[in-house]
Amino acid sequence: MFGRSTTDTEITEASYGPKNRRKGNDFHIGSLNVRSISDQSKAEAFDLLAVNSGCKVIALQETKRKEGEWVLSSGAELICTRREAREGGLAFWIHKDWLDSLVETKRESDRISTASFDFHGSHLHVINVYAPTSAANETQSDKFYKDLKKSKSDCNGCPKYGLNINPSKTQILMNKYVTRSDIDILNTRMKSPKKVKYLGRTFADDGSLTEEVARRIRAGWAAFNAIRRELLQSPQKTRIRLLTTTVIPAMTYGCETWTSKEADTKRLQRAVSNMFEIAGCDPPDMEKQVLRRKLKWAGHVSRMKYDRWAKIVSEWDPRGSARPRGRPPKRWADDIKDSIKIFIHNEALRGNLGHGRRRIGILEARRAWSTVGRDRVTWRSLVRSIQDGN
């Protein structure tokens, strides 16, 4: 984005363009308050200056030229946007090498214009801004900054990353803490269902796992039936390994982020027990299977930097007001905190709380689960205790 004041007399450059893959150089973009290029002779003189500057695009202010497009001697184009009677006008000088990549130039307001480029899927948006002077009233200034914010929002959207919104496939999931309202994108009313499938998981608007657990059970049976013939013809040790490496992962996919209730775990356990009974094997404890995976993921989260989204979300309190009456809802970290309490109790019975660093780590875990997670030795002991059934 380039904005100029009335005192600018030289081209200011910035290497904001995409990389030139063949030469390894940045493309340069410039900005200049030209103070008038109303006739063709002034435009040609500026064209010579622009070519020598090495810029590929130059945003111009106060052109005092009517709306239109002009091809200059160098092969570059001068594209001027419509101006109001009392405004100087905005324009873009675009080098001939970039004309094939130009998508459009757009007048956002009397003081803002944009130019969009497409370089084989890489998008570049240049915003040309002529800010109001101190003599402008408050209404004019507010309108300018509102228009500027809208222009920046439009340019920083999906096209910047080579993505486009498909309204027919886009769905919006709202939870119970949000006031439901209709949302239109590209003149299309977005669907707002009660459940949405995303990245192999079903999300419900009430946060429940009923649909997701049912989906995991179906995936488990699909994996079981795919190997059923080979499974029943194999020795028991091989059966256990096959079930552990195919069925269990299918039924626990994404469980690291679950906030499961007892009823959800019982449904998983019944399905797994039926499969293992058919195979003639003892079923595993699904509550421990899910918990062990959650603990492993929690350890990774606790060691993340604070700018990571997983870290931010795990410590974020989304409610902006006091919680309602009644029992508080179960949280993702509750299972982890309960596991740590049990682990501390068992370690105390074994007399392991007096071993220096482990003692410090465990005691600090009473205040925050993320604290002990930074100590890999202690956290591995915690995960191993769940795996061993302690």
Image (cartoon, grey):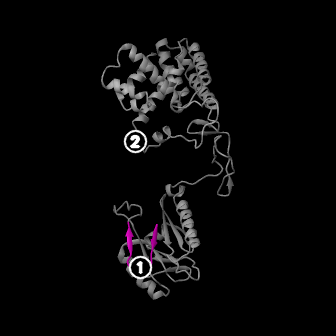
The CA distance from mark 1 to mark 2 is: 44 Å
What numbered label is drawn on residue 7? Answer: 1
How far from the left and from the top, in percent, is residue 77? 48, 77
Q: Is residue 172 above or below residue 365?
A: below
Q: Report the residue marked by disc 2.
A: 305
Region of the chain picked out in magenta, as a range: 1-14
Q: Amino acid at mark 1?
A: Thr
Q: Residues within 10 Å of mark 2 (few under 14, many from 20)?
A: few
Residue at 42% over, 16% down: 346
> SS of the residue at dot 1?
loop
Residue 280 can be seen in this image:
yes
In the image, is 48 to the left or to the right of 245? left
Q: Quadrant of the C terminus?
A: top left
Front position in the image: 289 or 330:
330
Camera sees residue 235:
no
- In the image, residue 318 sits, relative to residue 7, either above or below, namely above
Q: Earlier in the sequence, mark 1 or mark 2?
A: 1
As shown in the figure, which amino acid type bears the numbered disc 2?
Answer: Lys
Q: Position of residue 63 (x, y in %)?
A: 49, 81
Whether residue 388 is in magenta: the answer is no
Is 257 placed above or below 163 here? above
